[in-house]
């Protein structure tokens, strides 16, 4: 039996931000908490969002979202939400702000001392009720696709980086305006863009039966492969920015197929207190060795990836093409150059086995397999 569900209301195009007030009205949201980060605020994007709202609308801002969203940040934002009598969340930024916004919307309505009971690996899916506060997601990067995703990844107080998963966490509206990405720095464009590529590839290769999701993932990969370098080279290439935002959204639309070993490794590494590691960059490094690992069980799907990338139809050629793209984008060559300590070779493989993405990798990965993949990416 295949369960196939899609998704939410999406406003997509240059100028979509101008629809924000009307869309909030449709949701009955008149006292929003804007969840964002200081980088978005410093770039002037928060001001643009606030300018799209009526001057007399009570707007509260939480701008302390960390690079990897934490339970502590969610706790602080929920306190602000309740103190100001907010009735919904507008999450503005990349995946971190959108994931934190979802966590705030959940915690503000569901209560409890911790988010841990709601985490997927803690049996939390049935504990998440339909009365999650409404979330409007306004992405300012083209990577995670969290604006249409049913999950949020949060670093708990105990250091575990775990996922909240529920259809009730899908934002009520994804307001996707590529205009907000035009001034995104090249390095951030590259890392977030590779996140989108990783999502499209991993969801396509996941074993679940869902042809619509696979078609969406392939369309997203085709767009990202053709436009990411253009967007990095010229941030004001409007066609490239439009296609990258669409590719990111499509990668997340296919999430219901599941992800895999790339994310199973990236999630625990992203939970390290030091160094702070960019999720999309980690995915970029893990993609080549994971593709080689999965090749024996994914059959002709490798040929489809190869055709999009314009290389020979074999896993090594696909993996090499991705490694070559990483190099052309100026991404780090390995984990060691990112300052990752050698101790991860011991601790991360076991954590990857416990990650929610491990179970949907197309090939069963042992602790030894994860260690081998880590060693290839470590350098």
Image (cartoon, rainbow, N blue to C red):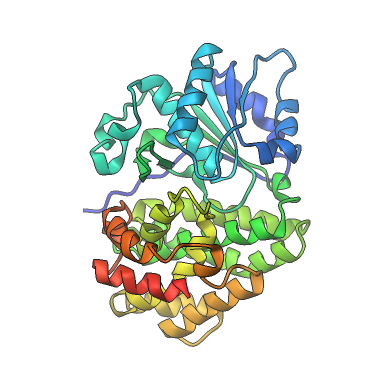
Residue situated in front as seen by the camera: 18 or 111: 111
Q: How many marks?
A: 0
In the image, 114: left or right of 339?
left
Question: Up-down: is 316 above or below 141?
Answer: below
From where the camera sits, is residue 220 visible?
A: no
Residue situated in front as seen by the camera: 61 or 175: 61
Image location (x, y in percent) of residue 242: 67, 54
From where the camera sits, is residue 254 visible?
A: yes
The residue most toward the left is: 1
Image location (x, y in percent) of residue 209: 29, 60
In the image, 367: left or right of 193?
left
Quarter of image, res 62: top right
Question: Up-down: is 291 above or below 89?
Answer: below
Image location (x, y in percent) of residue 280: 53, 58
Quarter of image, res 91: top right
* Residue at the (27%, 35%) spot, across then down: 124
Residue situated in front as seen by the camera: 281 or 26: 281
* Residue at the (70%, 62%) spot, across then down: 231
* Residue at the (58%, 56%) spot, across then down: 192
Image location (x, y in percent) of residue 66: 55, 40
């Amino acid at each position: 039996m295949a369960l196939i569900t899609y998704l939410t209301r999406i406003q997509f195009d240059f100028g979509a931000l101008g629809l924000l007030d009307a869309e909030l009205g449709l949701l009955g949201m008149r006292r929003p908490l804007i969840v964002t980060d200081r980088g978005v605020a410093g770039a002037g994007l928060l001001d643009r969002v606030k300018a799209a709202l009526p001057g007399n609308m009570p707007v509260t801002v939480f701008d302390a979202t960390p690079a990897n969203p934490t339970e502590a940040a969610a706790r602080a934002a929920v306190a602000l939400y309740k103190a100001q009598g907010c009735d919904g969340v507008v999450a503005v930024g990349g995946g971190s702000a959108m994931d934190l916004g979802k966590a705030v919307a959940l915690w503000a309505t569901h209560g409890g001392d911790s988010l841990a009971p709601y985490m997927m690996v803690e049996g939390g899916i049935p504990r998440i009720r339909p009365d999650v506060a409404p979330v409007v997601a306004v992405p300012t990067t083209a990577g995670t696709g969290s604006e249409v995703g049913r999950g949020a990844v949060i670093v708990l107080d105990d250091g575990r980086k775990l996922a909240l998963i529920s259809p009730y966490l899908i934002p009520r509206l994804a307001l996707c305006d590529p205009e907000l990405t035009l001034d995104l720095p090249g390095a951030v464009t590259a890392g977030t863009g590779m996140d989108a590529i990783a999502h499209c590839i991993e969801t396509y290769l996941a074993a679940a039966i869902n042809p619509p999701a696979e078609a969406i993932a392939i369309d997203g990969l085709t767009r990202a492969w053709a436009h990411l370098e253009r967007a990095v080279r010229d941030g004001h290439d409007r066609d490239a920015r439009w296609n990258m935002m669409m590719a990111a959204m499509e990668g997340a639309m296919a999430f219901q197929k599941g992800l895999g070993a790339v994310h199973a490794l990236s999630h625990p590494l992203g939970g390290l207190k030091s160094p702070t590691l960019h999720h999309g960059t980690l995915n970029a490094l893990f993609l080549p060795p994971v593709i080689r690992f999965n090749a024996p069980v994914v059959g002709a799907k490798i040929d489809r990836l190869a055709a999009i990338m314009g290389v020979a139809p074999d896993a090594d050629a696909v993996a090499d093409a991705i490694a070559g793209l990483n190099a052309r984008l100026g991404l780090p060559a390995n984990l060691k150059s990112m300052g990752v300590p050698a101790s991860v070779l011991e601790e991360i493989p076991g954590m990857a086995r416990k990650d929610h993405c491990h179970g949907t990798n197309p090939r069963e990965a042992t602790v030894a397999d994860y260690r081998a993949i880590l060693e290839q990416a470590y350098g």
